[in-house]
Amino acid sequence: MSEVEARTREALHHVVDDLDVTDGDIARLEAELMGALAAPRLRGGPPVVPPARRRWGLAAAAVVVAAAIAGGLALSADDSQTPSPAGAPTSDQPLIPADIVGTWQNVPESPWVWVFTADGRVGTYSTAGGYLAGELPIHVVSRSGDLYTVREEGCDRPLHLRTVSPGVVLATFPKNSCTGEDEPDQLSLERISPAPYLDGELSPRALSEVGPGSRSPFLHGVWLHVETHTLLVVGDPWRSGLLRYVLDDDGDGLTDPDQRGRVTLREDGSPVFLPDSGVQPSCPLILSSVTITGGQMRTTSPSDGCLPGPRTWVRIT
């Protein structure tokens, strides 16, 4: 499924959840919308008048498209696909070592989160919404020891990743051969998932910018529950007012999370976590109480939910 199709489906369910329509109606409309997205656009052709039985579907579709446009999404027949993973390693070394695969934070006093995947992709994010958008724009194309060649926007440049102790990596970009600009001499990264680097100091971060149209802004963030190595990421990836979440405890929340889905809010502002259709999580994510103070969140969950009992989370970004 392309990114446009995924966003359209998300917006569709957001619009029709409160309407008196059957699951069959939603399925038919979803199929029509997916077919419309897949069909080539006719340039300069006469307008096509739909039959009466489809008018309600197109009216709903117009609402969906309006919601998507409000979120900054431009639907196009030339929808770009998710970048393919980098090619095979040029040696018997993995593109990214197993001890680096996972989620890291840039320390100290930095909102940036780094993600390294086993197939050689890298992403950096300063907001929860950026993380949830799921883009991994940097590809490792070769590696020799701790010297990596990474490709971003068609340009290759070197990157040094040196593990100085378990859970701590120093990242160094030599002079940027793509722009000619000097990069910071050295960045220090500490692992937050899996197995957070507990010898380091986790500094709770206050709320950062969440953007217009966002709901429950205090819940936005990349939250870490240290004892269970669990990340809860809540944000608005497309600035459309549609809250999303990811729950993960082994560092692959972007590619294979334990849970992923939507967040709706009750009248009292408490969150309801709704896994994406087709996902069968091992436990429901239920937060019966949420208290957020600065960069810490205290939650309570029932015994049959994920992370039962009282828990304290730290906002990473």
Image: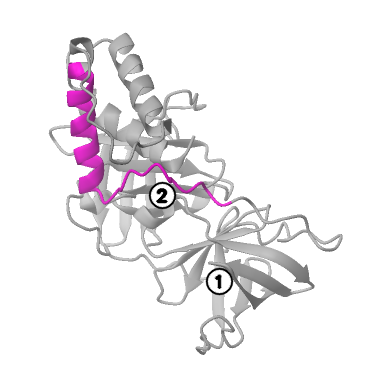
**Rendered image quadrant of residue 57:** top left
Q: Earlier in the sequence, mark 1 or mark 2?
A: 2
In the rendering, which numbered label is found on residue 189?
1
Quadrant in which the C terminus appears? bottom left
Residue where numbered disc 2 is placed:
132
Residue 77 covered by magenta stretch:
yes
Residue at figure coordinates x 34%, y 36% from the top left: 42
Residue at figure coordinates x 23%, y 33% from the top left: 64
Label 1: element kind: strand
Mark 1 or mark 2, which is nearer to you?
2
Local packing at callout 2 (Cα closer than 10 Å; few below 14, some 14-19, many 20+) is: many
Q: Amino acid at mark 2?
A: Leu
Q: CA distance from mark 1 to mark 2?
A: 20 Å
Image x and y of residue 96, in percent? 70, 61
Q: Amino acid at mark 1?
A: Leu
In the rendering, which numbered label is found on residue 307?
none
Residue found at the far left of this picture: 267
Image x and y of residue 278, in percent? 48, 23
Front-lying residue, 170 or 23:
23
Asked if one can make out residue 1 in the rendered structure from this viewpoint, the answer is yes
Asked if one can make out residue 198 in the rendered structure from this viewpoint, the answer is no
Residue at figure coordinates x 31%, y 12% from the top left: 23
Residue found at the far front of this picture: 45
